Image (spheres, rainbow, N blue to C red):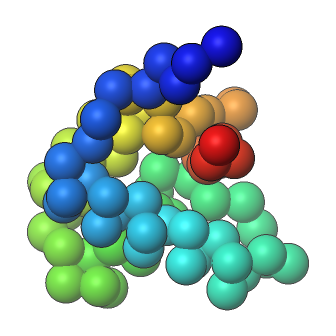
Amino acid sequence: MSNSRRPIESDEQDILDHLEAYIDANADDDTLTRETAVTYLMEQGIGHVEASDRIEQLLLKGYLYEVGEELRIPPRS
C-alpha cells in the first residue's frame, strides 16, 4: 500500500518536528493534548492561531491523529 498522506508544507513540517521533539523530551510525562501542543508551540515562538491551524491541518492530512484527547504521531514509513 502506498503512502496515502497528502504532502505537507514546510511550516507544517516545522510544527511536526517541534511536536516530535516535545514527545521525545517528555516521553515519561502526561500525554500530549491539543492544548498542551498549542502551549508548547507558543513557547517556541509560534502564534496561537497559527499553532491551532497547523495542528488541524496535520490532523486532516494524517500526520497527527487523536485518541480521545491525546495527539499522536503515526510512525513514518
Question: Would you say 41 lies left or right of 24 here?
Answer: left
Residue drawn at (27%, 42%), measured in percent from left and top? 8
- 19 on left or right of 31: left
Q: Position of residue 48 (x, y in %)?
A: 19, 62
* Location of the C terminus (image quadrant): top right
Residue located farthest toward the right when viewing the structure as drawn: 28
**Vertical position of residue 6 compared to residue 44: above or below:** above
Q: Is residue 20 above or below residue 53?
A: below
15 or 32, nearer to the observer = 15
User: Residue 44, image x and y in percent?
Assistant: 29, 85
Spot occupied by residue 53 in the image (x, y as percentages of width and height): 21, 44
Q: Measuring from the top left, give residue 61's x and y in whole percent.
A: 38, 28
Q: State the quadrant of the N terminus.
A: top right
Residue 52 in sight: no
Q: Is residue 69 left or right of residue 39?
A: right
- Examine the rendered structure and indicate whether residue 58 appears above or below residue 17: above
Identified at 62% across, 47% down, the residue is 76
Residue at (19, 58) in percent of width and height: 10
Asked whether 2 or 72 is in front, the reply is 2
Residue 53 appears in view = yes
- The answer to which image quadrant residue 21 occupies is bottom right
Taking the image as shown, residue 7 lies to the left or right of residue 32, namely: left
